[in-house]
């Protein structure tokens, strides 16, 4: 099987579906792009945003994806890639993901995203210090939704938050 990627907004369940998927597809290696970047730079995502800003982080995402796809080709490893919510805002990343993976958009409504993000806020620089979570999610989704749709080969609705079921669907559609 070739590489699989999971895209979608923060709080849509990319990491959880990735973990469920790796239980189904043992031969594939699970990579969370944020974790990969933290290991690559020795810094946390919030630290990178604070010291260098968003555009530097987007460039790190692009370089990380380039490294991962190159390594996969050299070693013959297939990956389950759980991407960041904003990875698709970089054109080079959209192209790399579309051409190197079967890409799945985990689609959730604004209500689901807000409720998940309230439950598991984490430390998310893109949601910090703004007027109200819901309006920030709406604002970012307005820009990103077309990019998720343009990049994905398949769309999986995850409003039921049933990540195990979503993983089964992804596994059945991936080639
Ligand atoms: C971001 C999403 C985060 C992380 C960074 C930026 C975004 O990943 O990459 O904080 O711009 O949506 P998750 O989607 O895994 O939270």
Image (cartoon, grey):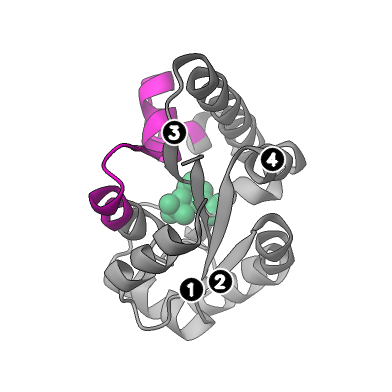
User: Which quarter of the figure has residue 135?
Assistant: bottom right
Q: Residues within 10 Å of mark 3 (few under 14, many from 20)?
A: many
The residue identified by callout 2 is 137
State how far apart marks 3 and 4 are (Cα): 14 Å
State how far apart marks 2 and 3 are (Cα): 32 Å
Q: Residue at x 44, y 29 (%)?
A: 37
State how far apart marks 1 and 2 are (Cα): 6 Å
The residue identified by callout 3 is 78
The residue identified by callout 1 is 133
State how far apart marks 2 and 4 are (Cα): 28 Å
Please say if 174 is above or below 56: below
The residue identified by callout 4 is 99
Please say if 103 is above or below 57: below
The magenta segment? 19-48
Q: Position of residue 148 (x, y in %)?
A: 65, 61
Q: Residue at x 66, y 36 (%)?
A: 55
Magenta residues, dominant SS class: helix
């Amino acid at each position: 099987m070739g590489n699989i990627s999971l895209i979608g907004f923060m709080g849509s369940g990319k990491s959880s579906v990735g973990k469920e998927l790796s239980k189904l597809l043992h031969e594939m290696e699970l990579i969370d792009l944020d974790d990969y970047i933290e290991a690559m730079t020795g810094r946390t995502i919030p630290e990178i945003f604070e010291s260098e800003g968003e555009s530097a982080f987007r460039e790190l995402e692009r370089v990380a994806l380039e490294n991962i796809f190159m390594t996969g080709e050299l070693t013959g490893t297939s990956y389950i890639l759980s991407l960041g919510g904003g990875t698709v805002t970089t054109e080079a990343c959209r192209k790399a993901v579309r051409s190197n993976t079967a890409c799945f958009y985990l689609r959730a409504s604004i209500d689901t995203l807000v409720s998940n993000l309230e439950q598991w806020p984490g430390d998310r620089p893109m949601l910090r210090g703004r007027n109200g979570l819901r309006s920030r999610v709406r604002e970012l989704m307005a820009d990103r939704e077309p990019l998720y749709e343009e990049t994905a080969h398949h769309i999986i609705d995850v409003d039921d938050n049933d990540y195990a079921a979503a993983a089964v669907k992804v596994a059945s559609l991936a080639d």
